[in-house]
Image (cartoon, rainbow, N blue to C red):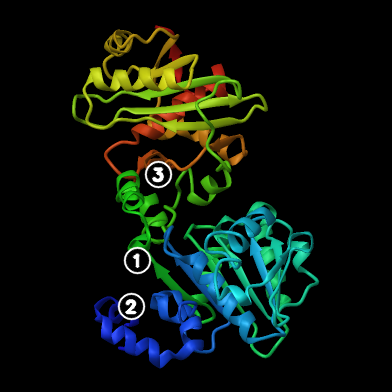
Amino acid sequence: MAEADPLQWLTEADEAELERFAVQLGPTGQREWRWNWRVWARPSQLAPAGDWRVWLVMAGRGFGKTRCGAEWVNEIAENDPEARIALVAAHLGEARAVMVEGESGLLSVGAPWRRPVFEPSLRRLTWPNGAQATLYSAAEPEALRGPQHSHAWCDEVAKWDNAAARAVASWDNLLMGLRLGRDPRVVATTTPRSVPLVMRLLAESERGEVTVTRGSTFDNAANLPARFLDTMRGSFGQSLLGRQEIDGELIAEIEGALWSRALLETCRADHAPECSRPEYTRIVVGVDPPASDGGDACGIVVVGLGADGMAHVLADASVEKAGPERWARAVAGAAEAWQADRVVAEANQGGAMVGSVLRAAQLSLPLRLVHASRGKVARAEPVAALYEAGRVRHAGLFPALEDEMCGLIAGGSYQGPGRSPDRADALVWALTELMLGKGGAPRVRVA
């Protein structure tokens, strides 16, 4: 068998070659061979050679980062009965659901007869040879202060809670406890995001203190459904967020931007809600109509106000290169789907025409036309302050909208994708209506 590429050899070998290979393996080899990760893994999923202490695997979604971390931990545990391994995730539920019980978790990899026993009440896995791993939450840095470990696997470190510097504190406490055995090591697997801990690890990699492996979702295309790959291309394309979430590229923050990606990550809700009204006291659709047919996008953003006073960005229903009839139907559709109680639309371009087009689309709910007295960036500044104050949540990922938000620069310029931040402007109108009221910056006239 060709050592350089065993998978290719398996694909191309004829029946006689496969039979000879099976005979050479013998009974034990035949039983073990299918569980040998080093045969099946891509080179980028194997731990690098050399004397490293921290290995950062920073890649797009679906790359196989979880499998990579789980197989590394399993190999350590099977070969070292004295191994004491820390498994750290954003919270304990995620550590159990992904790192332990997930499809690529520790209870699914390795030979079944050597898999560990999981004791949920103790947060502990124990391998047949005595090696152990313990689950920890990165949201509780103090839990990592006392225990000692020989190895650690930290999953999705970019998702760790950054409030009060918890993520960095958890990492530091973990490192200070890595003092068992002769060669303590830690693997961190994550999708790239511009958060303090990830930026610190990358800075340390430039000094040779951290070894980094990068990769894309499409590196693992052979093991992913074609429909998933098509959806990723269609939904994210070449947006900045797509480059981050799919291509595994760390998107640098733009200096002076009103919103940073790190800030937006702290504002992201755990799950996207259904199109259901009872959760919200008000729901508003913000609209930034295009100045001409086939020109800029028509920004259409749905925002709800929760009973707790928090605003929730629910949907980005914006349409591109649409004539008046099409974008008006899109506004009406979003309002109906989310049971909105008001549409707020900018009328600087087109004036009464905007109201006429929307009413022609059978939009029966209250319509408010607003006229901007200041530029888009100036209008966005008080809304950005709401995010800084923690009063807005994003119910999911909105790549095109967030790309525009992160391109609005304090002082009046726009450095994001496209000619104009139409989606971001629609968001601003909706949040101004919900959260800033009459004290908001724009002058408002009821049509």
Q: Quadrant of residue 157?
A: bottom right
Place of residue 352 in the rendered image (x, y in percent of width and height, measured from the top left)? 30, 9
Write down the residue under mark 2: 7
Residue depicted at x 53% and y 66% = 189
Q: Residues within 10 Å of mark 3 (few under 14, many from 20)?
A: many
Residue depicted at x 73% and y 76% = 177
- Looking at the rendered image, the disc whose residue lies closer to the viewer, 3 or 2, is 2
Place of residue 149 in the rendered image (x, y in percent of width and height, measured from the top left)? 72, 78
Is the Cβ of the residue at disc 3 closer than 8 Å to that at disc 1?
no
Tell which residue pokes out farthest to the bottom in this image.
24
Write down the residue under mark 3: 399
Q: Is residue 49 visible?
A: no
Q: Earlier in the sequence, mark 3 or mark 1?
A: 1
Q: CA distance from mark 1 to mark 2?
A: 15 Å
Residue depicted at x 39% and y 67% = 215
Residue 11, compared with residue 435, is above or below; it is below
Front residue of 111 and 361? 111
Instruction: Please tell me the numbered disc located at residue 262.
Output: none
Q: CA distance from mark 3 to mark 1?
A: 21 Å
Q: CA distance from mark 3 to mark 2?
A: 36 Å
Place of residue 358 in the rendered image (x, y in percent of width and height, measured from the top left)? 32, 13
Place of residue 67 in the rendered image (x, y in percent of width and height, measured from the top left)? 50, 68
Question: Disc 3 on helix, strand or loop?
Answer: helix
